[in-house]
Amino acid sequence: MADLDVGSGFGFGSDAARIGAAILFLQASTNAMDVFSAVNSSPWTAENFGGDELKNESVREYVWHGVGLTVFYIVGASVLARSAWPLIGGGITLGYMYWLYSRALGRARARQSTGWTDGQAQAQSGGTYSPPAAAAVGSP
């Protein structure tokens, strides 16, 4: 019977090699999310505070810390494993996280959102508060 090892056609080799590649890919991706969680608040928080220029700059600084730490770990994992899978998995998530924070900060700047109390004072004084319209997906 013909060999049904479809992974070998893609350079994955044996079942054990494919499993190892999947683990490296997934772990590097998860590591990127862990790093961003450790050094920064959520994109939602960035979107709600980033209208303040100093806070916006602060978030951006920590985004770059996240980028640096993630690159360090995914390159190190790739060298140790002699595999590109950590670079691929971590790189995809790193790109996504950078885009996500950049979009959140762009929305905050456009809405001039500077904190939790935006609109609350107006609502407490008898006015009504309507949150700003959501920016289109992909817009800053």
Image (cartoon, rainbow, N blue to C red):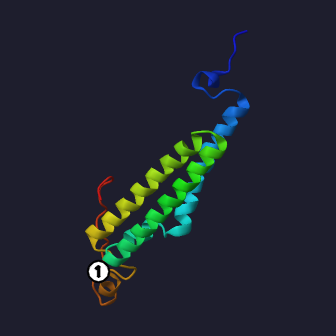
- Label 1 Cα neighbours within 10 Å, binned few <14 / some 14-19 / many ≥20: few
> Which quadrant holds residue 17?
top right
x 46%, y 68%: residue = 62
Nearer to the camera, 78 or 7: 78
x 32%, y 81%: residue = 119
Q: Is residue 9 depicted above or below 44 in this figure?
A: above
Extreme residue toward the top, this view: 1
Residue 40 seen from this side: yes
Identify the amino acid type marked 1. Thr
| Secondary-structure class at tag 1 | loop
> Which quadrant holds residue 123?
bottom left
x 73%, y 33%: residue = 16
Q: Is residue 71 depicted above or below 41 in this figure?
A: above
x 32%, y 69%: residue = 108
Q: Quadrant of the N terminus?
A: top right
From the viewer's perspective, is 120 left or right of 27? Answer: left
Residue behind mark 1: 128
Q: Quadrant of the C terminus?
A: bottom left
From the viewer's perspective, is 105 left or right of 94? Answer: left
Q: Is residue 74 depicted above or below 42 in this figure?
A: above
Expressed as whole percent of the image width and height from the top left, the position of residue 22 reads 64, 39
Expressed as whole percent of the image width and height from the top left, the position of residue 12 reads 63, 29
Nearer to the camera, 117 or 45: 45
Nearer to the camera, 80 or 49: 80
Expressed as whole percent of the image width and height from the top left, the position of residue 61 reads 42, 69
